[in-house]
Image (spheres, rainbow, N blue to C red):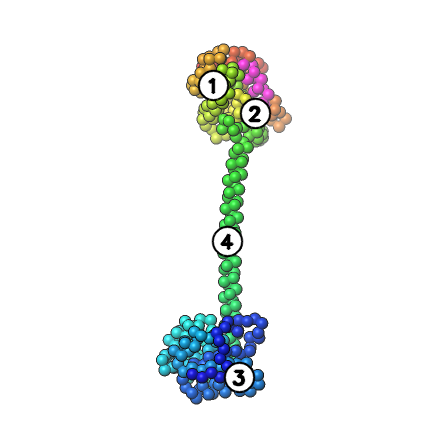
Amino acid sequence: METTLLNRSYQSPSWLNTDREPTILRNVLLIEDNLGDVFLIKNMLLAEVEEPKLFLSHVNSLGEALQRLEKEYFDAVLLDLGLPDSHGMNTLRRLRQKVPDVPIVVLTDLDNDALAAQLIQQGAQAYLIKSHISQSWLKSTITLAMARSKHVALQHQHEQHLEQSNQVLQGQIRAYMDEIDRLKEELQTLSALASTDGLTGVANRYCFEEYFTREWLQGCRDQTPLSAIMIDLDYFKQFNDGYGHLQGDVCLRQVAQSLHRLLKRPRDIIARYGGEEFVALLPDTPMSGAVRVATSLGLEIKALAIRHPSSNISRWVTASFGVASIIPQSHTSASDFMDAADRALYFAKDNGRDRIAYYQSSKFVTQPII
């Protein structure tokens, strides 16, 4: 084994140092067992160099080269495929496995285009026929091989950086999407809380008024009837006085959930209007249909059989109902419509309770819930 000019200890590849010119030759390893070829190549590479910038090391076999490559980094390798301990394509494969990032220039006596293509496919940077080598060609080939390897390595580093950045970005996107999903769920929860009566679990007055506005406009467009039912539990103050407010709250929850279960059409809504008062809105429902629904609601409340000893009309909790129905018009007042339902409710309460009141033939009429 022979080293010309200088042997350097292992260090990072000089051709990856972007501060240096890529055309400056550095540490080259020649793997060649023919001493005549060694002499020729050495003279070509080292001739007419006033300030040596090329460090040429020489070994006779692949085994020696592999040992040398474990201890020292080379910027390029000149490889003869016919060595005492390895021959042909296998020599290149073994060397490439050892130093996958070092540019390899193959030296051979064979002028074979198919072999040249196969060598390039297996990782050689260049392919030189010994009988055709000149000083300038050899130097420029090594320089080009180093520059090409540098470009490939930098491109690989760039791809790795992009992949890492992409993974970080995807992680951030996943985190943002998770946060968006969490915020959506939180918003849905807050929206439900904002539109739900905390005591009874049915819609609150704010939700009802928003819904009523939409359905009123829909009725105006479609010219379909809209009905409202105002509901008030009879003698509920006396119920609270007799049983206490905690039991009164239980009663309100039972009544509200019972009314909610009875209204099965998707567009029907029951809401707590305030205190012991509830309201039902029935889109696309005429007066006759609304009266039937009010009757069913009254019977449902009675079926709960909630004892009410303080009631003046029944042993059980009952309710009074005021019904109003209209085909909304752009010139009519939505608030007047709700006032009509409220007036009907008070007419029912003033005329015996536990009954339904509604406007018919220019006057209020009532009917008991039976």
Instruction: Give the residue at mark 4.
Output: 170
Name the amino acid, label 1. Answer: Gly
* CA separation in Å, label 3 and label 4: 50 Å
Please provide percent x and percent y for residue 109: 42, 84
Tag 1 or tag 2, which sits nearer the N-term? Answer: 1
Looking at the rendering, in which quadrant would you find the C terminus?
Answer: top left
Image coordinates of residue 257 in percent, x first then y, are 46, 25
| Mark sitting earlier along the chain (3/1) | 3
Please identify the residue farthest to the front as the structure is shown.
9
Between discs 3 and 2, the one toward the N terminus: 3
Residue at mark 3: 136
Nearer the observer: mark 2 or 1; the answer is: 1
Element type at marker 1? helix
From which residue to which does the magenta span run? Answer: 337-349
Q: Crowding at label 4, few (<14), some or many (≥20) Cα neighbours within 10 Å?
A: few
Asked whether 163 falls inside the magenta stretch, the response is no
Amino acid found under the numbered disc labelled 3: Ser
Query: Which label is found at residue 298?
Result: 1
Q: Main secondary structure of the magenta part?
A: helix
Residue 327 is tagged as: 2
Instruction: Give the residue at x 49% y 15%.
Output: 242
Q: Is residue 258 visible?
A: yes
Among numbered discs 3 and 4, the one appearing first in the sequence = 3
| Disc 3 to disc 2, C-alpha distance | 99 Å
x 47%, y 83%: residue: 3
SS state under label 4: helix
Say if residue 222 shows up in the picture: no
**Contact, CB < 8 Å: mark 2 with mark 4?**
no
Q: Earlier along the polypeptide chain: callout 4 or callout 1?
A: 4
